[in-house]
């Protein structure tokens, strides 16, 4: 009984701590500009103006399109590359395999902030600055280690003999991979795709550093460039509304695939 | 339909381990050949080399007269059934069976027809739309067989296909495999570690040990004329009893008693220039309760007394276990090694326990000091140094037992030819049937 109570309290504290800022953003997004600084938690007067304002503004719509486009492309590229790499890691013995795994882990652990300055110079030199590829490439690079890790766990669970059977049935190695192995690893690929997409969608540091216009700027970065309706009003309302708008798809996404993500993150940890 | 010829095939793994050492084996078209041996003897590696899943280090593999050493599995036209079945979990039974045909771009109506035909043979028709996960072990096994049958391949390869089934189902499926092979008349190479499966299924059985082919022959040949200690000990259940014996002035001293040498054995020993210390092998059924032996049959063997440790009644026969001081002198190590090799050491059967199969009419009880009799006509005598069966002598080779074994220098590489030819004709009759 006591134990239950303890866990319950801990859970409640955690949920409240997380939810209050979220609810606050939600509340702010419905407040009129003058009410932003009043001390009430819920708006006294509800308004949709923040939402209608941002949804009519190219300053938000264009970055939203960028976010979706860059996120999807980076996700697809990362999952395809990661599944091939993970397959090699799980199935083949090749020299330098441990080094490769170590390097992948290293990339995942590297603080992104330390890379921003050199990458900025590189992107400028290569003409990638303020383009979609300028964000897609680093997103793929940072999504890959995660993908390789999750997918290699999945591939390891697939019996080796299935591939031999496919070979005996007349499949080329590529057919064996696409028709037998990949379908079986599909849950892993979906999990990887979700996690990589979440990463791309939420990423802020690269998005703000490697873009200069709404031509390539993603939604989280675009929020930072919102301006008020006049130079004396702060854009708090529209920012809050935009934050809510870009959070909703993620919440739906996660609720929908929650079981998959958990299964994906823990699979390989225990057998069966 | 094709014959499979292994010509001095060798497999050496990158770490230097020699898994298969110069195996030569002619498998005739339509023949059912079993590769049998303890685990680690190289039988699965041999099968994988035939399949193309393992590279061949040296030697030549011909299927239907064509050298296929460097061909990919898909170009060899052979089907394989795996120990784990290796069914594709995301496909239905029908899709599993039709997968190979689909890859070969066979028209869908032909695929359906062939899958339905195979399903009918294997009694799987009502399961065609189910996924493997919802099938029982026996059904999965049949799907794995079906996947091979559908393709109508030149040869079937089976890697311990029944070892995941429970004992009762295994016996059932054993009959099924045999029936299917006869019905289709396709060449089949079957790997197992179970000598019972080997004896009951195959036209010919190839016994392997540490990468070497020990003996190839029909089950009866292997049982009656084992080339060496290993084959003698491996084939037969319960296994052959081995004892140390010495030859002295026309007499043979065995732990069971002294016996005069028969003409057959004396001749064989002289021919082989055998040493004085030997190992004799006696099959359990050579023993009998002395009270049940007719007086005129008695002179073919010798009587002795033994205290019965354990008695197991099988209904039709009785197995009795007793101990004799068999592990004497220099031969003990050799016998122990064999026991370990054939796995009997694990089951607690030490070298000096003798098992005898006697008539169920016996009145012998556990703990009795019983009067027993052993028939010496089917006695085998082995050279402890080489393990070779001396009693077979020259006559053994004419029997076409086809020894290519490493320790056996007289065997020669082409020795499988004779037996292969006779069994080939068996295959032919099956084809026309």
Image (cartoon, coloured by chain):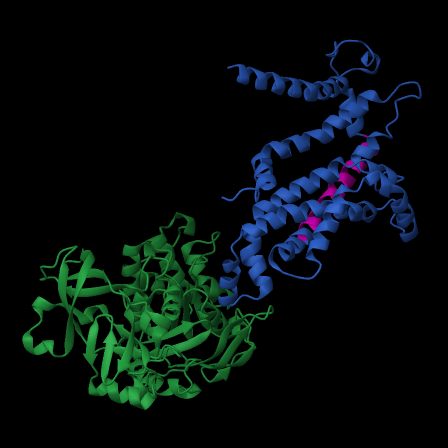
Please tell me in which quadrant of the rendered image residue A214 appears.
Answer: top right
Residue for point 42% across, 77% down: B213
Observer able to see residue B399? no
B41 relative to B376, above or below = above
Question: In the figure, what tint was chain A given?
Answer: blue
Give the x, y percent position of residue B66. Answer: 49, 83
Residue for point 42% across, 52% down: B132
Q: Nearer the viewer, residue A229 or B417?
A: B417
Give the x, y percent position of residue B154. Answer: 42, 76
Residue for point 60% across, 38% down: A261
Say left or right for B322 vs B389.
left
Please tell me in which quadrant of the rendered image residue A93 appears.
Answer: bottom right
The chain coloured green is B
Q: Quadrant of the N terminus of chain B?
A: bottom left
Majority SS type along the magenta span: helix
Please, which residue is most extreme toward the left here? B295
Q: Quadrant of the C terminus of chain B?
A: bottom left
Residue for point 54% across, 65% down: A171
Give the x, y percent position of residue B46. Answer: 47, 72
Instruction: Give the magenta range.
Output: A57-80
Give the x, y percent position of residue B416. Answer: 38, 84
């Amino acid at each position: 009984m006591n134990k239950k109570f303890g866990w319950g309290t801990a859970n409640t504290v955690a949920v409240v701590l997380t939810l209050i800022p979220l609810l606050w953003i939600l509340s702010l997004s419905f407040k009129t500009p003058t009410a932003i600084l009043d001390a009430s938690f819920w708006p006294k007067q509800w308004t949709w103006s923040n939402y209608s304002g941002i949804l009519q503004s190219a300053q938000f719509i264009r970055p939203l399109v960028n976010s979706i486009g860059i996120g999807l492309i980076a996700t697809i590229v990362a999952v395809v590359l990661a599944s091939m790499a993970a397959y090699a890691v799980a199935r083949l013995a090749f020299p330098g395999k441990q080094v490769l795994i170590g390097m992948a882990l290293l990339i995942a652990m590297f603080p992104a902030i330390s890379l921003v300055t050199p990458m900025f110079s590189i992107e400028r030199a290569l003409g990638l600055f303020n383009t979609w590829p300028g964000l897609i490439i680093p997103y793929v690079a940072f999504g890959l280690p995660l993908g390789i890790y999750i997918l290699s766990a999945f591939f390891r669970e697939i019996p080796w003999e299935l591939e031999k059977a496919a070979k005996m049935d007349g499949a080329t190695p590529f057919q064996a991979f696409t028709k037998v192995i990949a379908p079986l690893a599909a849950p892993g690929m979906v999990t990887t795709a979700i996690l990589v997409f979440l990463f791309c969608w939420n990423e802020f540091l690269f998005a703000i550093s490697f873009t200069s216009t709404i031509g390539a700027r993603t939604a989280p970065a675009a929020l930072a460039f919102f301006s008020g309706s006049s130079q004396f009003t702060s854009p708090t309302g529209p920012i809050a509304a935009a934050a809510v708008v870009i959070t909703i798809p993620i919440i739906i996404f996660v609720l929908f695939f929650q079981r998959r993500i958990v299964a994906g993150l823990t699979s390989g940890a225990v057998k069966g | 339909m094709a014959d499979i010829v292994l010509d001095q095939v060798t497999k050496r793994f990158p770490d230097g381990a020699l898994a298969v050492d110069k195996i030569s084996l002619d498998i005739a078209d339509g023949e059912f050949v079993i590769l049998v041996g303890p685990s680690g003897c190289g039988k699965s590696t041999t099968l994988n080399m035939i399949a193309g899943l393992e590279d061949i280090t040296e030697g030549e593999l011909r299927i239907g007269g064509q050298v296929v050493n460097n061909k990919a599995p898909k170009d060899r036209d052979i089907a394989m059934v795996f120990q784990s079945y290796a069914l594709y979990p995301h496909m239905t039974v029908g899709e599993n069976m039709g997968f190979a045909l689909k890859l070969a771009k066979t028209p869908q109506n032909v695929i359906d027809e062939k899958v339905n035909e195979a399903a009918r043979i294997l009694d799987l028709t009502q399961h065609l739309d189910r996924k493997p996960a919802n099938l029982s072990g026996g059904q999965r096994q049949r799907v794995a067989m079906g996947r091979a049958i559908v393709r109508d391949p030149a040869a079937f390869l089976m890697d311990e296909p029944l070892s995941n089934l429970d004992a009762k189902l295994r016996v059932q499926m054993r009959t099924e495999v045999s029936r299917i092979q006869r019905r289709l008349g396709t060449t089949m190479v079957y790997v197992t570690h179970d000598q019972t499966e080997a004896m009951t299924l195959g036209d010919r059985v190839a016994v392997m040990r540490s990468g070497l082919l020990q003996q190839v022959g029909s089950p009866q040949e292997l049982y009656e004329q084992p080339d060496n200690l290993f084959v003698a000990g491996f084939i037969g259940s319960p296994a052959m009893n081995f004892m140390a014996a010495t030859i002295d002035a026309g007499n043979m001293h065995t732990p069971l008693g002294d016996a005069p040498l028969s003409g057959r054995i004396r001749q064989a020993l002289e021919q082989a220039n055998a040493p004085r210390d030997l190992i004799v092998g006696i099959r359990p059924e050579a023993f009998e309760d002395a009270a049940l032996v007719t007086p005129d049959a008695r002179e073919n063997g010798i009587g002795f007394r033994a205290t019965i440790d354990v008695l197991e009644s099988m209904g039709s026969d009785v197995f009795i276990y007793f101990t004799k001081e068999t592990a004497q002198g220099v031969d003990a190590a050799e016998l122990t090694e064999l026991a370990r090799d054939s796995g009997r050491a694990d089951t607690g059967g030490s070298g000096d326990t003798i098992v005898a199969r006697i008539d169920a009419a016996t009145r012998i009880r556990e703990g009795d000091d019983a009067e027993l009799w052993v028939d010496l006509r089917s006695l085998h005598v082995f050279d402890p140094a080489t393990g070779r069966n001396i009693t077979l002598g020259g006559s053994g080779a004419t029997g076409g037992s086809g020894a290519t074994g490493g320790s056996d220098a007289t065997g020669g590489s082409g020795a499988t030819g004779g037996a292969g030819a006779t069994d080939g004709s068996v295959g032919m009759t099956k084809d026309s049937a």
